């Protein structure tokens, strides 16, 4: 089998590398010349994703994985072409911006010279697959193809494992011929008995949005319960465990925090809200989730300011973690993008450290001082704020933290420390939905 992967970003590069590991010949294409040159000439991985460098190196060496900016070359002899380009929020209205997908479809049409399965791996609203088919037919009436929807459920930070051992694979394919190609591509997953769901195109497209908006709702639910916990003196950790042990609820995605962010949940919740409104079937739950989450990210800066006495003018705040979650360098819609500027606006100086995200972060923030390590970040600061739960922040040497900070004050927006321990250590401590100390 041979495939072309259009878009060599978080999803395209991981999917391409994983398919090549499955034994498929993969050519990854991108318009970004620097990205492709780096990959091709220096084996440079453009993103931070654990394990990806080794996977790319071994499959490139084995001759199953290559990179190009030339789609024609990539499509030569391909059984399938995957579209894994970005679908960001459209400026102004929140609909998914499908221009990259439709441009890719036009380009694919131009180079199609044999039966090809065109697979949308990008997260795309209901109806996009049919539109991709229409575009290809219009641009190349003689083209012999099927359009398939195959949404991706990988999580950044554990993307390779998620791709290789997924809970399920969803395939919206409506002809036997296309289904057979997809079955062959995912043969390795059949062997490990991964559930593979074949559905209609629209169903597959909607499954992806329904999954992401459900998860965003679950996070938002526990975040609101956390706020209530703070008012009534309950502990959100215990509440989450108490409900999560119920098999109907499940324990995952019940961690209270500063609000969901990242490259998917914010834009996908918004896009589904728009789709539902367009079709006259508004999703009021998701509309509410979107607005609660937006407000929450903004409210987090206020929580910090209040804990620091209501005025942070002239104070230095040490911020640990800037990416939207650990084990990625992705800053897209990270809560830090709301919290850091709001703290600056309130008069604080921000010194920050993130193990992988500072290069990306520097494109978004102004006047942030970047530190070389977590400890370097907090030296002489008035307070410490944990924004992202990187493992290295979970086991800080608290004695050292105390000597470095001007005063032992920790605002823990990821609940990675425990109020009792922090009290015993003599910290003033503010978590989310749990007892504050001091
Ligand atoms: N990032 C995630 O964790 C994740 C998970 C599941 C699904 N998704 C979905 O996957 C899609 C891709 O997301 P991403 O995070 O990988 O995006 P990304 O921005 O990291 O990568 C997209 C790449 O596509 C390239 N590109 C755009 N148009 C092109 C064209 N016509 N030809 C060649 N290359 C082109 C861009 O240069 C870029 O490198 C989105 O729809 C997203 O919602 C993302």
Image (spheres, grey):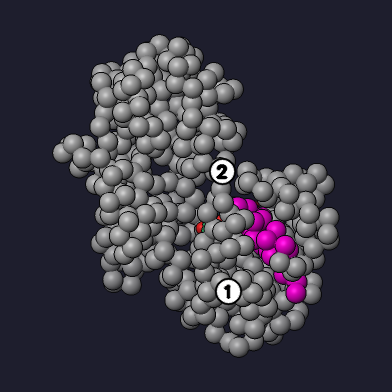
Q: Position of residue 166 (x, y in %)?
A: 55, 64
- Name which residue lies at 33% across and 72% down: 279
Label 1 lies in ligand 1 vicinity (Cβ under 8 Å): no
- 219 with respect to 350 (left or right): left
Q: Position of residue 402 (x, y in %)?
A: 42, 15
Q: Residues within 10 Å of mark 2 (few under 14, many from 20)?
A: many
Q: Nearer the viewer, residue 403 or 25?
A: 403
Q: Residues within 10 Å of mark 1 (few under 14, many from 20)?
A: few
Question: Can see residue 271?
Answer: no
Residue 252 falls in image quadrant: bottom left
- The image quadrant where one finds the C terminus is top left
84 within the magenta span: no
- Name which residue lies at 75% across and 71% down: 2
The residue lying furthest to the left in this view is: 232
| Residue bounds of the magenta highlight | 1-21
Is disc 1 placed on a helix, strand or loop?
A: loop
- Name which residue lies at 43% across and 46% down: 261
Q: Which residue is mark 1?
A: 193
- 123 with respect to 436 (left or right): right
Q: Nearer the viewer, residue 45 or 158?
A: 158
Q: Nearer the viewer, residue 101 or 305?
A: 305
Residue 328, numbered circle: 2
Residue 117 falls in image quadrant: bottom right
Is disc 2 placed on a helix, strand or loop?
A: loop
């Amino acid at each position: 089998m041979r495939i072309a992967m259009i878009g060599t970003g978080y999803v395209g590069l991981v999917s391409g590398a994983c398919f090549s590991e499955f034994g498929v010949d993969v050519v990854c294409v991108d318009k970004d010349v620097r990205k492709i040159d780096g990959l091709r000439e220096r084996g440079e991985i453009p993103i931070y994703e654990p394990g990806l460098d080794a996977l790319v190196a071994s499959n490139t060496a084995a001759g199953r994985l290559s990179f190009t900016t030339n789609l024609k070359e990539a499509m030569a002899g391909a059984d399938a072409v995957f579209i894994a380009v970005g679908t960001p929020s459209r400026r102004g209205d929140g609909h998914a911006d499908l221009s990259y997908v439709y441009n890719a479809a036009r380009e694919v049409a131009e180079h199609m010279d044999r039966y090809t399965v065109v697979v949308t791996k990008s997260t795309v609203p209901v109806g996009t697959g049919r539109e991709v088919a229409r575009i290809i037919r219009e641009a190349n009436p003689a083209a012999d193809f099927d359009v398939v929807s195959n949404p991706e459920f990988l999580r950044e930070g554990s993307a390779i494992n998620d791709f290789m051992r997924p809970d399920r694979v969803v395939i919206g394919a409506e002809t036997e011929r296309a289904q057979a190609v997809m079955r062959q591509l995912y043969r390795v997953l059949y062997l490990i008995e991964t559930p593979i769901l074949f559905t209609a195109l629209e169903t597959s497209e909607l499954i992806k949005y329904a999954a992401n908006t459900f998860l965003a709702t679950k996070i938002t639910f526990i975040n609101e319960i956390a706020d209530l916990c703070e008012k009534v003196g309950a502990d959100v950790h215990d509440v989450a465990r108490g409900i999560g042990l119920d098999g109907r609820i499940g324990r995952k995605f019940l961690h209270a925090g500063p609000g969901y962010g990242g490259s998917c949940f914010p834009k996908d919740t918004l896009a589904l809200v728009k789709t539902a409104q367009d079709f006259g079937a508004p999703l009021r739950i998701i509309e509410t989730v979107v607005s609660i989450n937006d407000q929450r990210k903004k409210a987090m800066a206020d929580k910090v300011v209040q804990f620091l006495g209501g005025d942070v003018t002239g104070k230095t705040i040490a911020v640990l973690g800037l990416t939207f979650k650990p084990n990625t360098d992705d800053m897209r819609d990270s809560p830090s993008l709301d919290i850091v500027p709001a703290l600056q606006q309130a008069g604080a100086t921000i010194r920050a450290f993130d193990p992988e995200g500072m290069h990306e972060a520097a494109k978004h923030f102004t006047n942030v001082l970047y530190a070389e390590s977590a400890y370097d970040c907090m030296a002489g600061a008035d307070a410490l704020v944990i924004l992202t739960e990187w493992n290295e922040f979970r086991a800080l040497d608290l004695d050292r933290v105390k000597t470095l900070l001007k005063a032992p004050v920790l605002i823990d927006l990821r609940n990675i420390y425990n109020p009792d321990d922090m009290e015993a250590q003599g910290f003033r401590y503010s978590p989310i939905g749990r007892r504050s100390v001091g």
